Amino acid sequence: MLLIVVVLTFLLLESASGDAVDAYLLSIGGGDATVAQSLRQAYGLDQSMLARLWLYFSSLASFDLGWSVAFGRPVLDLILERLPNTLLLMGSATALSFGLGSALGIVAGAKPESIRDRVLSTASLILYAIPSFWLGLVLSIVFAVQLRLLPTSGIETIASGKAGFARALDIAKHLVLPVGALALIYMALFLRVMRSGMAEAWTLDFVLFARSKGLSRSRIVLRHVARNALLPLVTMLGLQSAAMLGGSVVIESIFAIPGFGRLAQEAVSGRDAPLLMGIIVVSAVLVICVNLIIDIVYAALDPRVGASEPNT
Amino acid sequence: MTIATLSRRTLLQAGGALLASTALPTATLAQAGSRLIVAADSEPKNLNPAIVASNGVFFIASKVVEPLAEASFDGKDGLAPRLATSWEGSADGKSVTFKLREGVKWHDGKPFTSADVAYSALSIWKPLQNLGRLVFANLEAVETPDATTAVFKFSKPTPLQLIRNALPVVSSVVPKHLYEGTDIATNPANVKLVGTGPFKLTEYKPGEYYRLTKNADYWGKGEPKLDEIIFRVLPDRAGAGAALEAEEIQLAAFSAVPLTDLARISKVPGLKVISKGYEALTYQLVVEINHRRKELADLKVRQAIAHAIDKNFVVDTIFLGYAAASTGPVPKNAPEFYDASVPTYAFDTAKANALLDEAGYKKGANGTRFSLKLRPAPYFNETKQFGDYLRQALAAVGIDAQLINADSAAHQKAVYTDHDFDLAIGPPVFRGDPAISTTILVRSGIPAGVPFSNQGGYENKELDGIIAKAAETVDTATRTELYKQFQKIVATDLPLINVAEWGFITVARDTVQNVSNNPRWAVSNWSDTALKS
């Protein structure tokens, strides 16, 4: 699985015109042919494509992610430096969009086709249709530039010397806008899946039975309808975590957060194959891990999943 | 009457109270230290300006590592002394003597001497630096008769005029004691800079900021005036404007605020838009031509293309007035060399059509004469927008230009290595002297793979001859005259078409003082920059 991902990334970057040396020479405003040649030698770009791919695999086998040519630093260092920021951003945004999305989904799904449902569904659809960069910019202009409530960008106040709780608070403040922008967009998905799951559940026999038993409405909504509609939502959560990694590229650029997405973008424009492959490998591992956790959660939520296994 | 006086008094009192309340916090802030926060859009991998002489590196590194001399609006030879206090060339052009500043110390406390200059010149500028390789190509030795004298010896006559004009860019001095005997390319001091400048590089957080702090032992009396400069990394182009408005940063240089936002930003109270301070780093909007293409090898076709471009439209609409129309390969900002008496090509579609007819490329049934591949460089919004404009301008004279947009690395390979273009749009820089990075745009014999050079296959023996002669003409007046001829030939024969020339825009809070007071301000040392509290 990982192997395929790595090879595909390598081939994709290989098919793009220009290499790391071209990108570097441009960034410094020129250089002569001998410089270019010696750089290509130093980066190993004078070797054949297969030789480089083989070299990469052999070092990957010993958990060595290689050396970034665009940054002149080990890939692992770069990734470890940026990963926490992205995890924080993604984690908070996923939690928020999942929490808010499912809660509003319950509100909407409690009475399908009601006015409440219509308003929420339409509003969420509008949010989903908004491009993330636009939403990010608008949030930043309104809350940071005009109202001055929150900082425009960055992960924390630069060189503030804050530590401990004050620093955590500072980071939280900086995260409000980017997390909000990401979460608002992905929230719509969760909301709609929850809502349609619930709308469907209302027509099922066990709900009819619960109603005929004379259970209170709120009990039916939460215990019977919502709980059953939650299952596809958890599946979505696993899938969305991968999408969120992609979506954070734009948000990280707008809010100047030194994260994974921005690193990936810089790796592509610098034609930095080792770095980009390192990012892809780590992202793939991350997504696999998230889905593993989701599967475990799924089993806990739905007794049928775990219980059926011993019988097969 | 009483009511009026009363209200006036209360108003005054209220105003006074307001003033006092706002003045108080600013005063305490100033005591806590003056920190200038600046937007930065890139983080160079190698921050050593002695190796990488580029604006991206200078923007940050020029505050830490100093050149022998800096550009100046009113100084002698257009220079202000930095590490060198005087320079003198010999009559035969084979030696230049620099007197160096006394009592200068490196940031690590070691004294700065002529040995550092000799080492930087011979071991770094000449063999390793992107521009120094050219300027110091014939540098043979640097003699150091004493600690404050460095004598540059050249194997062939090298014009002092060129050395002088190049000094601000090519002469960043680095400490010999940290570099000698190490692998220069991977020396840790390339990232953790050690210089003689007014600021020390004290912290770098990748993706976030660079922190420069005051060098208390700086040789300039009473300088630097700031305690700290923070270069905050803001990759998004909308980010710098927003951060300026929110008062999170105080300065954005190099047009970090896009031209289209300037009209709005200039109305924000407390912010000023400054177009001065980039005179010595003029960028030129140029149509690069592939002369291997049969049609383009014909002078009449090139003239027709020049006539088809409305330079004023480009200046007014694409650059929103923050540029000037070009007449030739040397910009007006270089009065030492600029010659206005060259052939010009007024915007005239009818004439362009006539020239193309004359050249034998009649319009076909569909109204087109021939098709071209047009590659605009992606580095600036303006180069991309000019690509769109040029396509339309060419369509008006029956040339069908097909736009190919690519990212930086791909563009560079396609144009400068593979020659896979008919027309390209590039932004070369005029760096104070035509010999530094201008003649290379039209000179023949440059191998493939050199960015910002003549890769269009153009060859003109007469022009090559003038370029070669100017390179070794020691007499300033004669050399200047040769470059005037150079401009005439380029404007007549059109190896490329110069369309416009522009500098960048700085946006700053009005509390920032002494902004843009030299022609390379953004990339100079900022020792006199101050914050008004």
Image (cartoon, grey):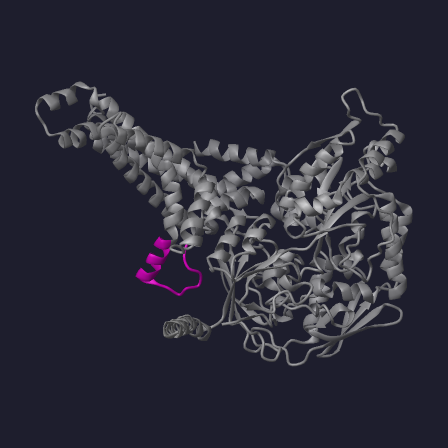
Q: Position of residue B99 (x, y in %)?
A: 74, 77
- The quadrant holding residue A190 is top left
Residue ID at (72%, 37%): B390
Q: x, y (%) of residue A193?
A: 31, 29
Quarter of the rendering containing residue B514: bottom right
Residue closest to the eye, A62 or A85: A85
Q: Is residue B318 left or right of residue A178?
A: right
Residue A82: % across, % down: 44, 50
Q: Against A300, is B325 above or below?
A: below
Quadrant assignment, res B196 = bottom right
Query: From the viewer's perspective, is B243 left or right of A236?
Result: right
Residue closest to the far left: A213
User: Quick check: can you spot residue B371?
Assistant: yes
Q: Is residue B225 above or below residue A163?
A: below
Q: Position of residue B10 (x, y in %)?
A: 37, 73
Q: Quadrant of the image for the N terminus of chain B?
A: bottom left
Pick the front one: B147 or B499: B499
Q: Is residue B321 left or right of residue B327?
A: left
Say if residue A238 shows up in the picture.
Answer: no
* Range shown magenta: A154-173
| Residue B10 lies in the magenta-colored region | no
- Within the magenta stretch, is there residue A155? yes
* Residue at image coords 78%, 65%: B163
- Vertical arrangement, residue B224 with respect to residue A285, above or below: below
Numbered disc total = 0
